[in-house]
């Protein structure tokens, strides 16, 4: 038995180390998987701003980090959520009113729990692309008071997706959208921004030349710098 116990401990540690962590939202019976990354030479024990990142539909959390967030230089804890709906070779975020209501509430509770689990500086920052951008817009309108800043990129949102739940704004929204986006029309982004502004949300909407995937190419540095600026502002406010 004494010889077996160390082996069991090694196997348990290996399972914890190599398996993506997950969080279960008991009130909705939903489990979210996520990946944790650290930027700017930060470590797990540090008190850090939390950047929550949502990939596009059909993508994975790891690939989204490698293609969209690997240039982030300021110290931060990056929580990359995996979309809860299997889609293609990856996962996706909700796109129906019922799914938005169910997963939107559960996602907010998951973020709240992770902000307590990890030593977090201020309210989280939310960043979402495409399908993840839709969820980011939804969070800005329905649960905006839980975030400091929200960055939707190439996303959309229409009134019919909002349901009957109360509007709760609070976060400043900095949105980006390509003028020639053929996957998610810029008109969908403009509709989301109009809903936000009507609710009283502070919104900056930047249109750029290019299509849906410019976040990974010509706009990558611009978006990264915008996120870094807000992370720095949060750290200054706490010092």
Image (cartoon, helix red, strand yellow):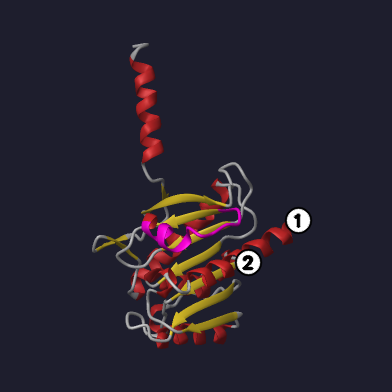
- Magenta segment: does it hold 89? no
In the picture of the structure, the residue carrying the numbered disc 1 is: 239
Classify mark 2: residues with Cα within 10 Å, few (<14), some (14-19) or many (20+): some
**Residue drawn at point x = 37 percent, y = 17 percent:** 5
Which x, y percent locates residue 181?
37, 83
**Residue drawn at point x = 40 percent, y = 69 percent:** 101
Left or right: where does residue 92 sit relative to residue 200?
left
Range of the magenta residues? 63-76
Residue 230: mark in rendering: 2
Classify mark 1: residues with Cα within 10 Å, few (<14), some (14-19) or many (20+): few
Which x, y percent locates residue 180?
38, 86
**Residue drawn at point x = 60 percent, y = 64 percent:** 228
Would you place residue 142 above or below residue 190 in this image? above
| Residue 7: quadrant of the picture | top left
**Residue drawn at point x = 41 percent, y = 57 percent:** 66
The residue nearer to you, when weighing 9 against 37, is 37
């Amino acid at each position: 038995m004494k010889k077996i116990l160390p082996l069991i401990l090694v196997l348990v540690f290996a399972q914890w180390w190599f398996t993506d962590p997950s969080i279960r939202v008991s009130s909705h019976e939903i489990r979210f998987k996520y990946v944790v990354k650290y930027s700017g030479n930060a470590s797990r024990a540090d008190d850090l701003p939390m950047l929550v990142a949502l990939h596009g539909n059909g993508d994975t959390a790891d690939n989204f980090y490698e293609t969209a967030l690997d240039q982030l230089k300021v110290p931060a804890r990056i929580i990359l959520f995996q979309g809860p709906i299997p889609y293609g070779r990856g996962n996706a975020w909700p796109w129906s009113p019922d799914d938005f209501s169910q997963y939107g509430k559960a996602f907010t509770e998951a973020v709240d729990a992770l902000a307590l689990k990890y030593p977090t500086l201020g309210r989280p920052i939310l960043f979402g692309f495409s399908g993840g951008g839709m969820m980011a817009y939804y969070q800005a309108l329905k649960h905006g008071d839980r975030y400091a800043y929200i960055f939707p990129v190439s996303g959309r949102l229409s009134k019919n997706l909002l349901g009957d739940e109360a509007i709760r704004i609070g976060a400043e929204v900095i949105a980006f959208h390509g003028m020639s986006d053929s996957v998610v029309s810029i008109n969908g982004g403009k509709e989301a921004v109009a809903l936000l502004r009507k609710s009283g949300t502070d919104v900056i909407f930047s249109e750029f030349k290019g299509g849906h995937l410019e976040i990974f190419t010509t706009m990558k540095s611009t978006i990264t710098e915008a996120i870094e600026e807000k992370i720095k502002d949060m750290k200054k406010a706490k010092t």
